[in-house]
Amino acid sequence: MAGESHHTGSPSALVRVSHGTVVRGTSTIWSDLNLEVFPGEFTAILGPNGSGKSTLLQVLLGRMPLAGGSAEVIGAAPGARRADIGYLPQHRAITAAERIRAIDIVGLGLTGARWGFRIPGTGTAEARRERAQIHEALDLVGASHYAQRAFGELSGGEQQRILIAQAIVRKPAFLLLDEPLDSLDLPTQASVVALIREVCTHQQIGVLLVAHDVNPLLTALDQVLYIANGHALQGAVDQVITSSQLSALFGMPIEVLTAADGRRVVIGTPDAPHHHGHRHSDGHGHG
Amino acid sequence: MIQMLSYPFMQHAVIAGTLIAVMSGTLGWFMVLRRQIFAGHTLSTMSFPGATAALVVGIPLAMGYYVACICAAIAIGWRAPTRHLTGPLSSARIGTIQVVGFATGFTLLGYSTHILGGLDQLLFGTFLGIDRTQLIILIAMTCVVVVIIACIGRPLVFASLDPELAEAVGLPVRALDIGFLILLGVVVAATAQITGALLVFALLVTPPAIAQRLTARPAQGMIVSAGIGVALIWLSLICAYFSVYPLGFFTTSIGFAVYVIVVVVQRSASGLRAVHV
Ligand SMILES: Nc1ncnc2c1ncn2[C@@H]1O[C@H](COP(=O)(O)OP(=O)(O)O)[C@@H](O)[C@H]1O
Ligand SMILES: [Mg+2]
């Protein structure tokens, strides 16, 4: 496990939620949620639509209080270390960026929240350092060769790489990605997952990625957090993704098949329809 | 041509036109980026109810312009903390505001007989009758607008492109939304007095539309947009000076022609590239 060696070196988790409960209005979204994420660890948050996955990210960003239990992010209260968190929201209105260069979109991740302006001729060393940082992020996601083009001219996969570069340009300790695989075709999903895995390992960033279909992620993950029916279940992939664990959590029969090469395929969870998952798991056995 | 500038009224017109073009070119760039073109159009029509109301109530015309535009800006920009400005509901709201504005304008028109003379001024402005006070107000306003945009430009670009993320990193997206509309309203009110209600919108939308085709860099886009606006106004003033047609005719038609030329040139250039590849 990629994160395992790190646990002994630095015992401090990036994220620690214990017995967390969230209430919205009068309804409890989930309760008794436990989660630990360590540097260099890739964790997926899975579960049907409306189960409270995005809500968990809001809690970690400090934008939503816990009604019970406790949460700690990078050793502080949620929200206190927001500058050290890279965040990629769900459903963004980024279409407005059609006529803005991709590199400027990445730059906003670094300096977008800065008020005021630089008097021309001053602070050139800082400007140079920022430019280098932006190019480093673009290199890391393999987007340098289309960074000068307008964002609207890029393909869905290229846009997603640019948005990931934007999320990591500050060199965050911790990355929150809300459904970054949405609306990407399967080969692109696979390459984006591989990219996130690489960034996670090489930069020793803790990654929390929200998805509603586990299959494209299975080989890259260190651990999963399933949320369903107001309950949550965290653990390593081979402990949690078993027929008995998932069937108990969802309250319905769920099958986990093991393919010839040892990969697992989850069949029967809501949002991951039968035929879809099955067919593609056969077709994409090579990864 | 040099002789044209020897008249004080032409000097004033050139200076005022330049200042107006700089302000509307810059704010228009954000308006187009934010896809608030309908909101911008509604603000430019607000000078009509503003002026008629001012004439009926008996306050200075200028005050009517400012009050109407700022009220409309707040009405358009107000939103619940968790909602964002785009979406079908918001354009329905903007449409309603525009209709209410027109209805108010026409209703008040019936209450006053001496408005008709003012109506001409309302639509076509008083470009050749700008006095020193107006000029000083415009100079001050341009300085303020440029400094404000320089200070909030980066967060405003961020909040315009990605309100969700901007809010998550702690930017006051809501304040930026409404603040931008109020700034736009003030500039529209000042511009409409001089160019008339019809030309305001052309100056707000044409230069940024051309600029966005020419460059995809934000800072450059704003500067190019303002520059195109200035060139457009100067050219129109020269044409209007030597002909019988009004300024607005030249501004709109030259602007449109430039836009079409840019589009055609870019299309054929990319067509050529495609052939070579
Ligand atoms: N602003 C809100 N106010 C009240 N309830 C909300 C709000 N946003 C989401 N919810 C509810 O919270 C639940 C969890 O939402 P969410 O975290 O977005 O789910 P997911 O990301 O897993 O699809 C849903 O049942 C949704 O109806
Ligand atoms: Mg969600």
Image (cartoon, coloured by chain):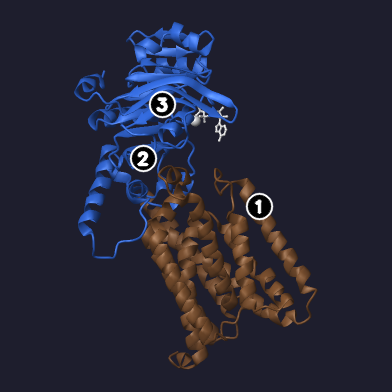
Chain colours: A blue, B brown
Label 3: few (<14), some (14–19) or many (≥20) C-alpha neighbours in 10 Å: some
Front label number (2 vs 1): 2
Chain bearing tag 1 is B
Residue A287, image x, y percentages: 33, 21
Residue B220, image x, y percentages: 37, 62
Quadrant for ligand 1?
Answer: top right
User: Which corner quadrant of the image does residue B45 belong to?
Assistant: bottom right
Residue B173, image x, y percentages: 48, 50
Judge left or right: residue B79 versus residue B2: right
Amino acid type, residue under disc 2 in the picture: Arg
Q: Do the residues indicated by labels 2 and 3 lie within the same chain of the protein?
A: yes
Real-space Cα separation, disc 3 to disc 1, in angstroms: 42 Å
User: Which corner quadrant of the image does residue A37 belong to?
Assistant: top left
Q: What residue is disc 1 on?
A: B93
Q: Secondary structure at mark 1?
A: helix
Label 1: few (<14), some (14–19) or many (≥20) C-alpha neighbours in 10 Å: some
Q: What residue is disc 3 on?
A: A70
Front label number (2 vs 3): 3
**Marks 3 and 1: CB-CB under 8 Å?**
no
Q: Secondary structure at mark 2?
A: helix
The mark nearer the N terminus, 2 or 3, is 3
**Disc 1, ligand 1: is the CB inside 8 Å?**
no
| B39, above or below A279, in the image | below
Residue drawn where x is 58% and y is 71% of the image: B189
Mark number, residue A82: 2
Judge left or right: residue B52 versus residue B217: right
Chain bearing tag 2 is A
Residue drawn where x is 73% and y is 69% of the image: B105
